[in-house]
Image (spheres, helix red, strand yellow):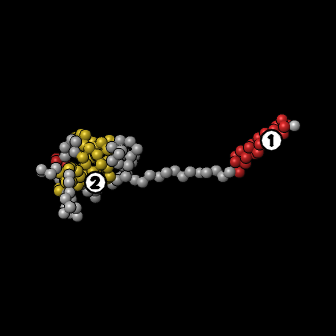
Amino acid sequence: MPKKFIFILVVILAILILGWFVFLAFFQKEVKLKPIVLPPIFSVVGEITEITGNSVKVKALKIQNSFSEDKEFLVLVASPVRGDASNGASSTVFSKMEIPQTISQEDVSKPILAQKSSFSDLKIKDNVAVESEVNLRDVSQFTAKSMQVLSIKLPSE
């Protein structure tokens, strides 16, 4: 009798488990996942790796930006002299910001001001912040709206 009882119990459990899977398969609502829409990126921070003509190559590390991998951009510079800034487009604005390595208690509330700069002041290995009017997420080349060289000012300077 105990073997027959165990057999019946196993059959009942198997039917219940099978019924549960059938229930889940037919009556559960299908979950539709919405695609993740990433916000646009209009600026990038990176290091200048090459300077040619009216463009620079900037290597942007993923850790400093909102990218899934390191990216290299060919950044074009618009200049009204060459006619790049015609049709209402403005020329690329250049500046340099020297950030103190240490900031004293008195200087904490003082703003760090940017100085005017130009394309000819750029050097390979400069760290720059580049602003664009297009979403940089899916492009590798763009025209810069502004480019700011970021440097650390050492105490002896």
| Residue that lies at the very extreme toward the left in this rendered image | 156
| Tag nearer the camera, 1 or 2 | 1
Q: Is residue 73 visible?
A: no
**As drawn, is 26 to the left or to the right of 120?**
right
Please tell me which residue lies in front, 89 or 11: 11
User: As rendered, which of 146 and 19 lies closer to the eye?
Assistant: 19
Q: Nearer the viewer, residue 106 or 136?
A: 106
Look at 71% across and 44% down and name the residue there. Answer: 21
Residue that appears at 61% across and 51% down: 31
Residue farthest along the front direction in this orientation: 2
Q: Quadrant of the N terminus?
A: top right
- Report x, y in % for residue 118: 18, 51
Q: Which residue carries the number 2 mark? A: 145
**Residue at (77%, 42%) from the top-left corner?**
13
Residue lying at the far right of the rendered structure: 1
Residue that carries the numbered disc 1 in the rendered image: 9
Per the image, label 1 sits on a secondary structure element best described as helix
**Is 147 displayed left or right of 67 in the figure?**
left
Query: Which of 69 and 83 lies nearest the eye of the viewer?
Result: 69
Name the kind of residue labelled 2 in the image: Lys
| Mark 1: amino acid | Leu
Image x and y of residue 145, in percent? 28, 54
Residue farthest toward the top in the current orientation of the protein: 3
| Image coords of residue 106 (percent x, y) | 18, 63
1 or 2: tag closer to the N-terminus: 1
Q: Which class describes the residues within 10 Å of circle 1: few (<14), some (14-19), or many (20+)?
A: few
